[in-house]
Image (cartoon, grey):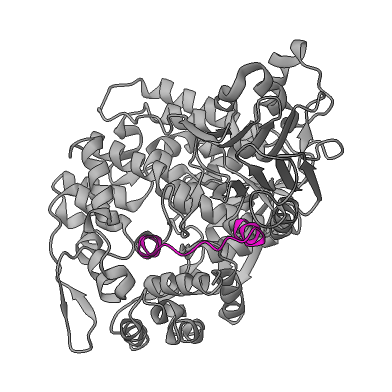
Amino acid sequence: MCGIAGVLRLGPGPEGRGEPGRGDPRRAVETMMDALRHRGPDADGLFEDGRIVLGHRRLAVLDLETGDQPMASEDGELVVVFNGEVFNHHALRAELQGRARFRTRSDTEVLLHAYRERGEGFVADLRGFFALALWDAHSGRLLLARDRVGQKPLFFSEHEGLLVFASEVRALLAGLGRLGAEPRVDPAAVAEALALRYTDGKRTAYRGIERVLPGERIVFESGHRRTARIAHPPAISGAETEVDEEAALEEFGARFDEAVRLRLEADVPLGLLLSGGLDSTAVLESAARQGTGALRTFTVAFSRSSESEGAAARATAEHFGTRHREIPLSEAHLVDRAAQVLSSLDEPFADPSLLPTRLVCEAAREEVTVALTGDGGDELLGGYRRYLRALAWAAGERGQVPSATKRISRRLRLIGSGLPRSFEAQPRSAAEVFVFESVKTPAPLRAFLAGPLLQDLPEDEAPEARIARELREAGGEDPASLLAAMLLFDQRHDLPGEMLVKVDRASMAASLEVRSPLLDHELIAFASTLPVSLKVAGGRGKVLLRHHLAGRVPEALLDLPKKGFGTPLGRWFRGALAPLASELLGASRLAADGYLDARALDRIRRAHVSRRRNFGELLWTLCALESWYRTTPG
């Protein structure tokens, strides 16, 4: 796991630094590498020729002695910087062995030989998670690429004939600053982050800065850009097909065990982030059965047992005999850490579970360098409650979705204090249940909060409209096609935009590599063929995973309530976090600059503290956006 950065002169011209852009590309890359130190504290490297400068910060996990980067081919024509792991590198090495001469044991060197033999399309052969930049000096070609699922980030920008790229936006901004560029905030991105808690797709918070999409490869050559993308996630079965459930269960088990086994390779200590839920329990069971010895496991425990995952994780750890560590999180400790975590954001990102995830990663890093997780099970096998609520609605079981009824509002009226209050209007369709449960801050509340810069954004670009369009295009309202559409949307958007951003930023801030077997792209492809009855049945999700674990773990561990690494925000913002909200939102720069309405922010805070409404999650979102905005250039 690492951080990468680089600057390429796009057009033809004389060799040398500083032309045609202002500033020095080498200094820009060095500045970006400094900003990425947390991603790779073990080593750094720099490559420079007349047109390109490549930088790398290394977190050493495999081939500790000869795996440093940038790594060049033997003839010096190819150079790569790489962030991530290729778990099938042994198989690829064996295929290439007779035609390639290897000098290291690293997966990085496999990339060079695979590109030489197979061209740009070699990226499709990689099984793992990665972001990479490969320079072909002979053709003057730079390839940028990301893994299919989008576990590792990569951002880029073009400025005065230069291409600048980096693993994180903050590093990219630092490099662009060295070159005389000052990207400006995009109001549409602020509105999107307010709605979803993240920015989606190509869009970043800054005009002129783009995100390499999951599964995308972008080639810069001869002053031109061309793009290709691996089709992922695959189309999900929208028909309730009949399958041999026993055979499907056996194949799932074999594929899952292989995904876990591949992720157990490391030349450094390895552990597991244990939430106590089905997903991380399944990963732990597979790892233990495959003979890894006593794993180290880690979880966060809040001071109140009703809000904590601690007891469930503890019971699971005791069953498997792990070396378990519980990280207590008291409210006295909360304020300083919350402010610190929020101030580290380089994108508008407001998933509140970032805080406990960051803390558990920091604790794990004190003992291990690599940690496995159960991330991805909900999106793969239908675990989120919003799927169950939408499916219940489709089946006519309207009484099973009371929370959806409360959250969905198409009309607002202002009560005496000026706060919006929703009518408990019924959803019009099952798809609408999913749409409005997926949008964290619905459109009427966003309109109440909006300042002048957000008030005139096109309605057809609102997240509600986009999600509804994608669901319509994906299928109908019958349970099979509806579940397929919901899973596909989350795998395309929420998973890479929210879940994986959270895990990457939290883990890399602690210099910890995190691996997620359930996000193996071959396992995802297999799961996409399974019928809805193996994902959701009887009002429960992840049916296949429950069947897989039956008889392998005590029944009691399969019925533990799902919490995840959550946070009791409603109570915290009436107590320990109230001063933070007052400091950030009481003198909001987003309001001063026209993005939000200062009076609306004040009313939201007052209504929450007085217990008239629970705005805990919204307050976290607003604090996260405000904290990010205070770090933006200009």
Quick check: is 193 in the magenta stretch?
A: yes
Dominant secondary structure, magenta? helix
Magenta part of the chain: 172-194
Q: Is residue 623 visible?
A: yes
Quick check: is 212 in the magenta stretch?
A: no
Q: Which quadrant would residue 417 be assigned to in this image? A: bottom left
Give the image location of residue 493, x and y in percent.
Answer: 40, 47
Q: Is residue 558 visible?
A: no
Which residue is the extreme one toward the front? 14
Above-or-below relation of 221 to 10:
above
Give the image location of residue 267, x and y in percent.
Answer: 79, 39
Q: Which quadrant would residue 456 be assigned to in this image? A: bottom left
Pick the quarter of the image with the C terminus.
bottom right
Residue name at image x 13 percent, y 60 percent = 426
Which residue is the extreme one toward the right? 65
Residue name at image x 31 percent, y 58 percent = 439
Above-or-below relation of 100 to 175:
above
Residue name at image x 51 percent, y 66 percent = 308
